[in-house]
């Protein structure tokens, strides 16, 4: 999905693709969604980042990385859906986040 993503220092925002991490159950009971930022900077992978293999199938315009930058945002910040991440890509990204979160 395309969202207005606020910078960590809250000094601004940028429109960018994001990956929804929260479930439909969570989203239906709240006015917000949990997302991970996506970036097209595939040359730099930091801990928890995942290079999306099937980026075209996910509706992304170019090769992308799902980052470990996870935020809760207001549902009203979602501009439009882009596509859906392949379940294998989602599982690999999720598995990479678990050690960072101590799970």
Image (cartoon, rainbow, N blue to C red):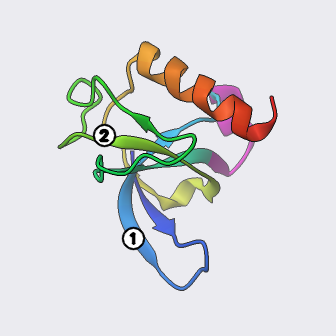
User: Which residue is at a point 51% across and 21% down the rendered structure image?
Assistant: 92
Q: Which structural element holds mark 2?
A: loop
| Mark 1 or 2, nearer chain start | 1
Quadrant of the image occupied by residue 15: bottom left
User: Which residue is at a point 39% across and 26% down the rendered structure image?
Assistant: 85
Quadrant of the image occupied by residue 48: top right
For the magenta stretch, what is the residue range? Answer: 24-33
| Residue 37 higher or lower than 86, as above or below | below
Judging depth in this view, the residue of 53 and 79 nearest the camera is 53
Q: Is residue 62 left or right of residue 73?
A: left
Q: Main secondary structure of the magenta part?
A: helix
| Residue 34 higher or lower than 7, as above or below | above
Judging depth in this view, the residue of 55 and 81 nearest the camera is 55
Whole-number angstrom distance, CA of label 1 to CA of label 2: 16 Å
Percent x, y for residue 86? 38, 18
Image marks 1 and 2: residues in contact by CB distance under 8 Å:
no
Percent x, y for residue 70? 61, 50
User: Which residue is at a point 24% across and 23% down the rendered structure image?
Assistant: 57
Which corner quadrant holds the N terminus? top left
Outermost residue on the bottom side: it is 11
Percent x, y for residue 31? 68, 51
User: Which residue is at a point 52% across and 28% down the rendered structure image?
Assistant: 93
Point out which mark residue 14 bears. Answer: 1
Q: Residues within 10 Å of mark 2 (few under 14, many from 20)?
A: some
Q: Which structural element holds mark 1?
A: strand
Task: Work out whether residue 28 can be spotted.
Answer: no
Q: Is residue 2 left or right of residue 99?
A: left
Point out which mark residue 82 bears. Answer: 2
């Amino acid at each position: 999905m395309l969202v207005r993503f606020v910078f960590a220092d809250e000094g601004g925002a940028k429109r960018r693709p994001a990956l929804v991490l929260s479930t439909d159950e969570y989203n239906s009971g709240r006015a917000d969604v949990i997302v991970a930022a996506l970036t097209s900077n595939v040359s730099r992978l930091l801990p928890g980042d995942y290079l999306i293999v099937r980026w075209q199938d996910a509706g992304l315009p170019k090769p992308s990385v799902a980052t470990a930058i996870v935020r809760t945002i207001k549902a009203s910040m979602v501009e439009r859906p882009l596509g859906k991440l392949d379940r294998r890509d989602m599982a690999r990204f999720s598995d990479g986040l678990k050690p960072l979160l101590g799970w």
